[in-house]
Amino acid sequence: MPYNIAMVSDFFFPQPGGVESHIYQLSSKLIDRGHKVIIITHAYAGRTGVRYLTNGLKVYHVPFFVIYRETTFPTVFSFFPIFRNIVIRERIEIVHGHGSLSSFCIEAILHARTMGLRAVFTDHSLFGFADAGSILTNKLLKFALSDVDHVICVSHTCKENTVLRASLDPLMVSVIPNAVVAENFRPLSYSSHRSAPGPPPRISPQDTITVVVISRLFYNKGTDLLIAAIPRILASHPNVCFIIAGSGPKAIDLEQMIERNVLQDRVEMLGPVRHEEVRDVMVRGHIYLHPSLTEAFGTVIVEAASCGLYVVCTRVGGIPEVLPTHMTEFAKPEEDDIVEATGRAIRALRAGKVRTELFHNQVKQMYSWTDVAQRTERVYDGIMGELSHDQFYQGVGVSGAWSATRGRAGMQSFALIERLKRYYGCGIWAGKLFCLCVIVDYLLYVCLEMFAPRSRIDICRNWPTKDIRDGKEKDPGLPKDDKERKETNARRVDSHYHDHD
């Protein structure tokens, strides 16, 4: 059945990035499948209020203060009145948060559960366990996921990391990878045939090989390794040049390296590029270099392979799961190994050992946003009770004790006392603080229901969409079953209050 879904994250367009692209593509495909999807994010420069994107995707740009890397200042409770108003206006049933470091995401999951809504979280990142920043982030993640219905990770490595960081039961975590719109990342000489005739192309020693790097220029993306490796790679291979696109605090270090080594004619820095311009940059190269220190998935390397580039990347996080070995040359996250791996890739291309002209069709068969949307939809069916417990966990042995505590299909209870029990187990001091936050959030919700009743909030009309499953256009006004939906929501709210009493 169709659902009303709110995607919540601090990270969305116009900022480029993997999380932003994931949210947009997933939302578009869910709309194609007949669901209603809105996006809640913070205001960007020139974008405040409500915007409509392609396919009727509505975006709420909430004006909140941004502190670091497009992350809003965590306020915990001040976001609740605005969030509640949007959720009621759009008749949201499922809140889907994205990003461990997103304040909007963490707060939205808390408020959604207080309002009696189902909540899903998608983790796109990997974090450690030793440094102070990781410890704080992991504790916040534990707070957010203590009362979530289901968790989605973009790779199996990401799942293991998230389960350990948030002390989750592995059965409530699914792995659904990112994807790529292969049609938007075609190589210059694209052939629709599965196999190209003739011998593989060779690049003579006199021809220039271009290495492309498209990344945010931050420490965790391996920019320091890149700065150290580029002069050595260029010194060993005369007919090689670099194209670097991206922005960040490490950009000044890259520019200083170029000036210090007098490499202006062999290293081109493009600065930030829009996502629709990424393909135009990639097709100028032969090799894509990705020296990241940590990565949960790495969508950009799939895009590079789809453009026909041979990928040199570090063997960290979920990167080894993304592409088959014949498309990649792996290296340790060390300067010497990156130099050696890039050299092997250059020699392989010159010898004609790599069939990069076949990569696009192979990537097209491996990744599809339609498949991602279908698998995400199945998660929604599970948490909404459309699938039975056995159907949702088909092929997985589920312990009776665990299933008994979560109910049908492993759904979390909305009862306040049950929620407090889950939060109380987060730590000696943190557990008490988390319980206090939940109680205050619930009291704020009661006050809002009393002094800003739902009857005063106008219900939005739906954008006309076509469900690709039956080819019928949906009514742009209120749905025909709106009365039934209102009665269901009323029963849910009554049950919600009854459980708390």
Image (cartoon, grey):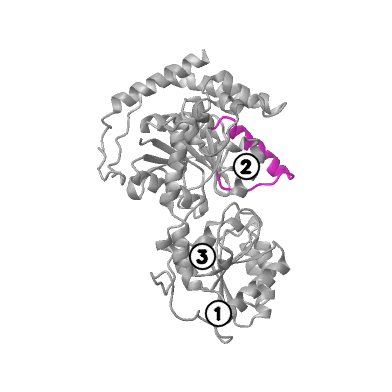
Measured in 3D between alpha carbons, the distance from the residue under mark 1 to the one under mark 3, in whole angstroms, is: 19 Å
Element type at marker 1? loop
Q: Which residue is mark 3?
A: 304
Count of marks, rendered view = 3
Residue 202, image x, y percentages: 53, 82
Q: Earlier in the sequence, mark 1 or mark 2?
A: 2
Is label 1 or label 2 in front? 1
Q: Which mark is residue 352?
A: 1
Query: What distance separates the C-alpha of mark 1 from that of mark 2?
Result: 41 Å
Is 12 located above or below residue 141 in the figure?
A: below
Residue 137 belongs to magenta span: yes
| Above or below 468: residue 499 | above
Q: Are marks 3 and 2 in contact (CB under 8 Å)?
A: no
Q: Is residue 346 visible?
A: yes
Q: Which numbered disc, 3 or 2, marks the residue that appears first in the sequence?
A: 2
Classify residue 461 as left or right of residue 136.
left
Q: Nearer the viewer, mark 1 or mark 3?
A: 1
Amino acid type of the residue tagged 2 in the rendering:
Thr
Q: Secondary structure at mark 2?
A: helix
Q: Quadrant of the N terminus?
A: top left
Looking at the picture, tell me which residue is in the foreground, 225 or 41: 225
Q: Nearer the viewer, residue 351 or 185?
A: 351
Percent position of residue 245, x then y = 54, 65
Mark 3 belongs to which amino acid?
Answer: Ala
**Residue 267 visible in the shown view:** no
* Residue annotated with mark 2: 162
Residue range highlighted in magenta: 123-148
Q: Is residue 90 left or right of residue 360?
A: left
> Badge 2 local density, few (<14 within 10 Å), some, or many (20+)?
many
Q: Residue at x 43, y 78 (%)?
A: 197
